[in-house]
Amino acid sequence: MREHRFTLEFPHAAARVWALFQRYDLWASYAPMVVGVEVVHPGVSNGNGLLRRVLYKMPLGRRGSALELVTHVEPGRGYNYTMLSRRPGNDQTGRVTLEPLGPDRTLLHFEERYNLTNPIIKLFEGQIYRFINKQNEDSMRRASAWLSAHPEFEG
């Protein structure tokens, strides 16, 4: 089992960051690997139980998809997600938390845990997840830059 954690300070209010993260139609605008996001099931009113399909770019021009179940939603503050794998034991789990630091400052906490069970792919686990971790961090930095470039965005 591997785990990746990082924090990033956004020069934006937590409400704006939260609003952007809930706009799945905008994810491809700031996440370099994301092609699109489809809401498969909306869950309840606060987003708990939401099931989304994230379509993403892969090396060599290929595309992949991941089904993510969103749980433990605290509106404006954070949520957990589970990437559902076809293989038992391969689910990835994560948490996004927003910590307001002031009227226009938010600390983002991101964590993701993963475990590969395929022995052949496990040989490349370190390389695969270094790449994915970098993309996740770049996506969060670009989300902050997107908000800076769109001061009119309220959600």
Image (tube, rainbow, N blue to C red):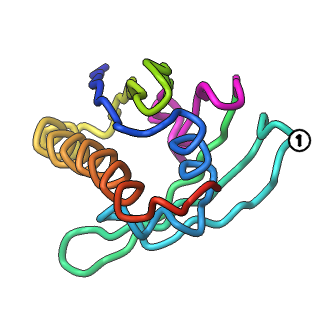
Q: Residue furthest bottom?
A: 61
Q: Name the residue under label 1.
A: 45
Q: Which residue is drawn at 15% across and 40% down?
A: 130
Q: In this view, does 25 lie above or below 77?
A: below
> Which x, y percent locates residue 135?
24, 51
**85 within the magenta span:** yes
Q: Residues within 10 Å of mark 1 (few under 14, many from 20)?
A: few
| Region in magenta | 72-95
81 with respect to 41 (left or right): left
**69 within the magenta span:** no
Q: For the residue marked with disc 1, what is the amino acid?
A: Ser
> Which x, y percent locates residue 123?
13, 39
Does the image show residue 24? yes
Q: Residue at x 18, y 77 (%)?
A: 60
Looking at the image, which is closer to me, 61 or 33?
33
42 with respect to 4 (left or right): right
Looking at the image, which is closer to me, 13 or 67?
13
